[in-house]
Amino acid sequence: MDSMGIMVRKQTAADQALRLDNQICFAVYSTAHAFNRVYKPLLDRLGLTYPQYLVMLALWERDDVPVKDLGERLFLDSGTLTPLLKRLEAAELIRRTRSTEDERVVLIALTPQGHALREKAKAVPQSILAASDCTVGELMAMKDEIVALRDRLNAVLGE
Amino acid sequence: MDSMGIMVRKQTAADQALRLDNQICFAVYSTAHAFNRVYKPLLDRLGLTYPQYLVMLALWERDDVPVKDLGERLFLDSGTLTPLLKRLEAAELIRRTRSTEDERVVLIALTPQGHALREKAKAVPQSILAASDCTVGELMAMKDEIVALRDRLNAVLGE
DNA sequence: TCCAATTAGATTGTGCGCAATATAAATTAT
DNA sequence: ATAATTTATATTGCGCACAATCTAATTGGA
């Protein structure tokens, strides 16, 4: 009750923290979806989904790598990667071959078409930059902060 | 070729932009997943998934609202919300009733159990804060930047 | 040597996320 | 008033994510 006798609910810190607007994770979650929607029409032209595009980015940097290696770079497990990689193989962008040295390992290599797709993909980042309406410097600064946060979260998970 | 005659590939801006490390969207994407993994054990105790938790947060702020309204607040459509809300209804946390004024509208209201769950949820944000290993001030500053970016991306989509 | 433990990847099942489409109710135009 | 359009929600289908489980290959002891 306040001095006028009207019921006034005290807003505690815990109450404030439960507000959607105050949650950084909702900000991150909803921004990830917004990015996805901006990427969609650009990636449709390449015949890729966003997670598939991430796999291709990783492979353009280094291919002939185990699924495990891709998983560590992208923070994804075999339950996600196995079917995704099979779809990329069906699209003839990658090849999956068992390692002869260790039969447990499946090595992922780009096909010539997979390599070639990189040229078409070069136009994508600058379209995203335009949509974000930021300078490269601003985006890189934000990226570094977000990555630092991600790494702290992952560190807690690793305990 | 450099001056010694050794083949040196020129790294163009487009090449740099395709590097995974340079992509803010991958930072956002992978941070969203990291958050999800930190939330998982906390939300398991409430019997909620992360998207369900977001819906509950929205409803704790204002319930007796159309599905449409929830969708706008959470940036989700009926294809996502309808089955999610049916699961929350099955868990007896919400009720779905057709509006009598407009038969097209389904109003979402919290049940007593739905309201009561809020008390248990109050412990969640501070666990997340601890995992993020940041001050509230730092997180809020990042949140504001990310939300600004999200809103610019969504503005482009709305054109 | 042989058995236990570990490791890489595949499989299954659940729950998003979203495009495309469907349906029914409400609104608008004629 | 009736037809055309718009609006709210539901449905279907596909592709992630990820937990849990499985199989097969490798490694590391006793």
Image: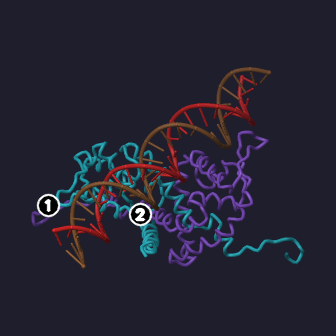
Chain colours: A cyan, B purple, C red, D brown
The answer to whether residue A23 is above or below residue A111 is below
Q: Residue at x 87, y 71 (%)?
A: A6
State left or right for residue C1 relative to residue A95. Answer: left
Rendering quarter of residue A113: top left
Q: As rendered, which of A104 and A39 lies closer to the eye? A: A104
Rendering quarter of residue B148: bottom right
The answer to whether residue A71 is above or below residue A82 is below
Quarter the C terminus of chain A occupies: bottom left
Within-10-Å neighbours for mark 2: few <14, some 14–19, many 20+: some
Q: Secondary structure at mark 1?
A: loop
State left or right for residue A51 relative to residue B15. Answer: right
Whole-angstrom CA distance, mark 2 to mark 1, is 29 Å
Amino acid type indicated by mark 2: Val
Q: Is residue B83 visible?
A: yes
Question: Are labels 2 and 1 on one chain?
Answer: no
* Label drawn at residue B7: 1
Q: Residue at x 39, y 54 (%)?
A: A80
Residue at the disc numbered 2 = A136
Marked residue chain, label 2:
A
Q: Residue at x 37, y 61 (%)?
A: A74
Residue at the far right in the pictured view? A4
Residue A20 x/y as whole percent: 63, 63
Quarter the N terminus of chain A occupies: bottom right
Amino acid type indicated by mark 1: Met
State left or right for residue C2 relative to residue D10. Answer: left
Q: Is residue B12 visible?
A: no
Q: Secondary structure at mark 2?
A: helix
